[in-house]
Image (spheres, rainbow, N blue to C red):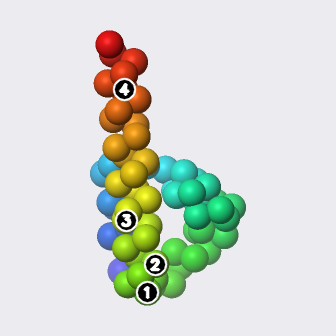
């Protein structure tokens, strides 16, 4: 199984691109992709899940604002 598949799937499900997560972490998307090659610690995993949630919520809010 691919390391961190759950993170990748969760990001995709929420319409969040990996480069957006990398940007929030302050690293390049290439470095983030390399980081995902090995299982993350529980703390790192939770931090990334929180970032995905924040980006997804911001996108929903932006869409709702644009619709009004």
Q: Is 5 left or right of 37, judged from the image as shown?
A: left
Is residue 30 visible from the viewing direction of this image? no
Residue 44, numbered circle = 2
User: Cα distance, mark 4 to mark 2?
Assistant: 29 Å
Indicate the position of residue 55 as horizontal and vertical percent values.
43, 48
Q: Reading the chain from its start, which is encountered first: label 2 or label 3?
A: 2
Residue carrying label 4? 63
Which numbered disc covers residue 41? 1
Quarter-of-image position of residue 31 = bottom right
Q: Is residue 43 above or below residue 54?
A: below
Q: Is residue 16 above or below residue 7?
A: above
Are discs 4 and 1 less than 8 Å apart at CB? no
Secondary structure category for the residue under label 4: helix
- Marking on residue 49: 3
Mark 2: few/some/many CA within 10 Å (<14, 14-19, 20+): few
Question: Residue 47 placed where, x, y %?
Answer: 43, 70
- Label 3: which secondary element: helix
- What residue is at 37 percent from the left and 46 percent from the top? 56
Tell me how far mark 1 sits from mark 3, CA to CA.
12 Å
Mark before the other along the chain sequence, 4 or 2: 2
Find the distance from the CA under tag 2 to the CA under tag 3.
9 Å
For marks 4 and 1, the one nearer the N-term is 1
| Pick the front one: 63 or 38 | 63
Badge 3, how many Cα within 10 Å: few under 14, some, many 20+?
some
Callout 1–callout 3 Cβ contact below 8 Å: no
Say whether residue 9 is left or right of residue 31: left
Q: Which residue is drawn at 30% across and 51% down?
A: 13
Residue 3, image x, y percentages: 43, 79
Q: Which residue lies furthest to the top in this view?
A: 68
Residue 12, position as x, y percentages in the image: 37, 52
């Amino acid at each position: 199984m691919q390391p961190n598949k759950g993170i990748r799937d969760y990001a995709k499900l929420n319409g969040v691109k990996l480069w957006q997560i990398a940007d929030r972490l302050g690293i390049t998307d290439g470095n983030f992709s390399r980081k995902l090659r090995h299982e993350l610690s529980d703390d790192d995993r939770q931090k990334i899940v929180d970032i995905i949630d924040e980006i997804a919520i911001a996108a929903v809010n932006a869409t709702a604002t644009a619709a009004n």
